[in-house]
Image: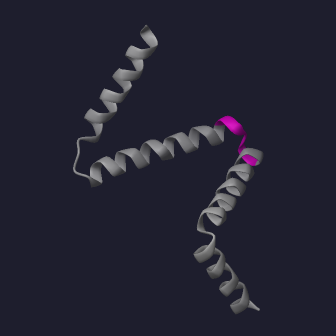
Amino acid sequence: MKEEFGQMLTQLWQNHRGKTSGLVIGMLFGTAVLCFGFWHTFFVICCGLIGLFVGLQLDNGEDAWANIREKVWTLLERFQR
């Protein structure tokens, strides 16, 4: 039974990777919203995305903080108009 379930999950992942990951992400997001509320969940996801952005910049050997300052400055200029 355990082996069959593992094979089924492996087939799902190999044949329907996008659908499977979308389902898992959607279920995790829904569970987080129910447990913690939308804005708390949104904040955690935003922090994770910022961390991902900084990590990608560091992996590429770029100056992450300069890029963040540039993007924030661009956003501030856009809202001042």
Q: Which quarter of the rendering shows the N terminus?
A: bottom right
Residue 23 lies left or right of residue 66; in this view the side is right
Up the image or down, 41 lies above or below 79; here it is below
Residue 69: image location, x then y, percent: 31, 28
Residue 52 lies left or right of residue 32; in this view the side is left
Task: State the count of labels.
Answer: 0
Residue 23 counted in the magenta span? no
Measuring 66% from the left and 75% from the top, which residue is drawn there?
A: 12
Up the image or down, 27 lies above or below 71; here it is below
Measuring 59% from the left and 68% from the top, which residue is drawn there?
A: 17
Residue 38 counted in the magenta span? yes
Task: From the viewer's side, name the closer residue of 13 and 38.
Answer: 13
Q: Give the range drawn in magenta.
A: 35-39
Measuring 42% from the left and 49% from the top, which residue is drawn there?
A: 52
Q: Which quarter of the rendering shows the C terminus?
A: top left
Colour scheme used in the picture? one colour
State the predominant SS element of the stretch in magenta.
helix
Task: From the viewer's side, name the closer residue of 64 and 4.
Answer: 4
Residue 79 lies left or right of residue 33; in this view the side is left
Measuring 58% from the left and 38% from the top, which residue is drawn there?
A: 43
Task: From the viewer's side, name the closer residue of 13 and 68.
Answer: 13
Residue that lies at the very extreme toward the top in this rendered image? 81
Residue 74: image location, x then y, percent: 36, 22
Residue that lies at the very extreme toward the front in this rendered image? 15
Name the quadrant containing residue 15.
bottom right
Name the quadrant containing residue 22.
bottom right
Residue 76: image location, x then y, percent: 40, 17
